[in-house]
Amino acid sequence: MATPEATPSSSSPDLLVEAFARYVTEQVTGDRFVELVHQEVDHALDAAARLTLGDVMTAEQVTGVALKYASEWRIEGAIPELSGEIARRVHARTLVTDDAPISDVVDDEHFAGLAEKVTSLPAFRRLLEEIVGSPVTARWVSFLLYRSAAGKLQRQHDAVRAVPGLGLLLEVTERISSRIVPRAGHSLEIAIRELAERTAQRLISRQNVDGALTDNEPLVEAILELWDEHSSDPVGSVIAAVNPDDIEDFLILGFEFWRDFRQTTHFRNIVSEGVEYFFEKYSPVTLAELLDEVGVSRDDMIEEALRFAPPILELTATNGMLTSIVERLFGPFAHSDEVQALLRERPQA
């Protein structure tokens, strides 16, 4: 009687998938995963040393992705809302209650260097020139001079009134002068205003300010004096000057500016030019060298892999998600005709 050809059990592909799922789980959990990470990072770096940036991507691809997310990606309302909520919480729980002095955040040396650099910028000088030459500035200076002069006259007037005898004499004199020159007080006010305007124009005239704008040392000294007065103030006292509503308003203004600016041709040109230069410089560089350029080392990659991956892999192994992933990816292969044929093959005697 002929013996029928032996066939594998109908569950063989399923058993194969189950065995592979157990193998994968063993590889990515426990101490075995630590060894696996070290091995795979080394393999990845070996491959990175043989591939250049230009081998794996083009400037056009990166520009397209950058413009998609920076210029075209829709920013939902939840993003600015969440930003505002986070800012309010940080303001209330961290910044306002911070008793550390401002100098702990920015030390004297760094602040002095920043002040020196900013005041020496041509753009800063041009800004000062525009401010000094503005008619609005002249009006403000003349207004302050007028208020100062008028206030001083009023204080002197009040002091004279307080002196016995002189107060009565001043009152009689004012009544007589008002009859002789009815609008003397008004004329005096106009004269003070005109004097203040002429003084202001002289103070901020080009010949008086050119030297100050050329030499930034006095301005730097003034800034550093102000810094010395307040560098020991608590951070919280400075932040308290800005309330949560102000922060939210600034965020809204910044969001609205960014929303409009990112749609402009100018912004797109900036992104495209930046990516193009990056590829001009790094296209022939290997990926391993590029990682080293940006400061990402082998130890960094291993550290971050072991920081985030184990809890996720342990969880998915426990709840069955890892097995489901293996079955979904490997199941069709195990049930393929090629594997079925391999399983039906009998070892030669």
Image (spheres, grey):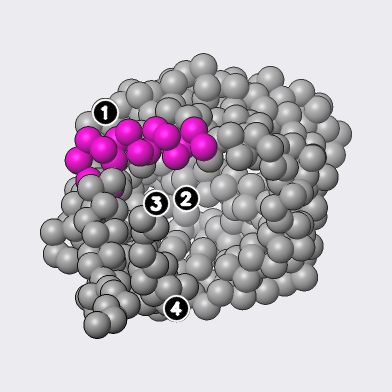
Cβ–Cβ under 8 Å for marks 3 and 1:
no
SS at circle 4: helix
What's the distance in space between the residues labelled 2 and 1, CA to CA?
60 Å
Reading the image, the residue beneath label 2 is: 173
Q: Is residue 33 magenta?
A: yes
Residue type at mark 4? Asp
Q: Which label lies toward us, 4 or 2?
A: 4
Q: CA distance from mark 4 to mark 2?
A: 121 Å
**Residue type at tag 3:** Glu
Q: Nearer the viewer, residue 275 or 321?
A: 321
Instruction: Name the residue beneath numbered marker 3.
Output: 171
**Callout 2: 10 Å neighbours few (<14), some, many (20+)?**
few
Label 4: which residue?
Answer: 337
The residue depicted at 42 percent of the width and 34 percent of the height is 39
Residue found at x 42% / y 77%:
336
For label 1, the SS is: loop
Q: Which residues are magenta?
A: 28-43
